[in-house]
Image: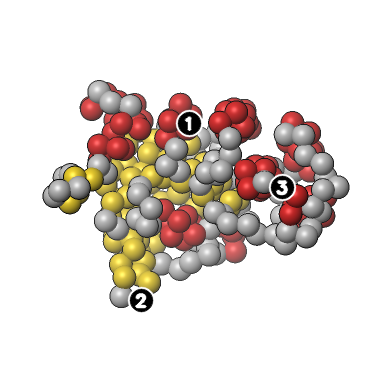
Amino acid sequence: MSYNVVADNLVKKYGSKLVLDKISFKIKSGRIVGLVSPNGSGKTTLIKLMADFLTADEGTLTIAGKKIGPETKAITSYLPDHDIFSKNCKLSDTIKFYGSYYKDFNEEKCQNYIKRFKFDTNAKLTSLSKGQTEILFLILTLSRDAKLFLLDEPLASVDPINREVIITTILKEFKEDSTIIISTHLLNDVEMILDEVIMLKDSTLLCHKSVEEIREETGKSLNDFFKDSFRIDWFGGDNK
């Protein structure tokens, strides 16, 4: 069986702090995967390893059968959880620069998104709200013809109406030969589009299952399963 993303015993430390402890999973093409955990549990670190912005201390990681490096970076479209352009740039200049940097950038697709969300390309980034900025960067990310899309908290500051439009857009544009990994805590919004979920807890892999498996085994929605898995007993620590 062919897998698009394979992690084998990944270990990552920041100094003496262990962030990821022997994380292993396999993801096939044609899957939309939720990466969920409480803040500080390693979601962003794991995504940065896949995007080749960090290097694992131990273990291996491959994308489309290739070890992490320039070849995988060329087929991976990464949306970070922070701004990546100067606020003084015009939207038109930002789009032009981004498109010139990636060979697989689809200009027509990008412009269709820009019109759908009614952006003024003559405006500067500084005039956009945080939610609008997130939408713009998501548009750029989804406008590539990549094999792997890594979306780190893509809906955090987006209003509920535009969240629905974005989720519909992700589904409409999703290609069966690619994989989308969405790091998020807004499970109520994305549960309907997720095929499977990876949960991290205390630096380790808590579970990697299909959403349907979780519903059948627990009788709970994905959001309820997540809340129960990480519920805090304020009088006795984690509810384990």
Q: Is residue 141 left or right of residue 52?
A: right
Task: Classify mark 1: helix, strand or loop.
Answer: helix
Verify CB contact (< 8 Å) between mark 3 and mark 2: no
Which residue is situated farthest in the front direction here?
235
Above or below residue 26? Residue 58 is below
Residue placed most toward the observer, 100 or 97:
97
Could you give the CA–CA distance between mark 1 and mark 2, rounded to whole angstroms? Answer: 36 Å
Residue placed most toward the observer, 21 or 153:
153
Above or below residue 3? Residue 193 is above
Residue placed most toward the observer, 129 or 26:
129
Residue found 53% across the figure and 58% down from its top: 51
Task: Name the amino acid type tagged 3.
Answer: Leu
Which residue is situated farthest in the bottom direction here?
15
Task: Classify mark 2: helix, strand or loop.
Answer: loop
Residue at numbered disc 3: 128
Residue found 86% across the figure and 47% down from its top: 122
Task: Name the amino acid type tagged 2.
Answer: Gly
**Mark closest to the chain's N terminus, 1 or 3:** 3
Verify CB contact (< 8 Å) between mark 1 and mark 2: no
Residue at numbered disc 2: 15
Residue at numbered disc 1: 189
Q: Is residue 151 left or right of residue 91?
A: left
Q: How many marks?
A: 3
Are there few (<14), some (14-19), or many (20+) residues within 10 Å of tag 1? some
Are there few (<14), some (14-19), or many (20+) residues within 10 Å of tag 2? few
Residue 150 appears in view: yes
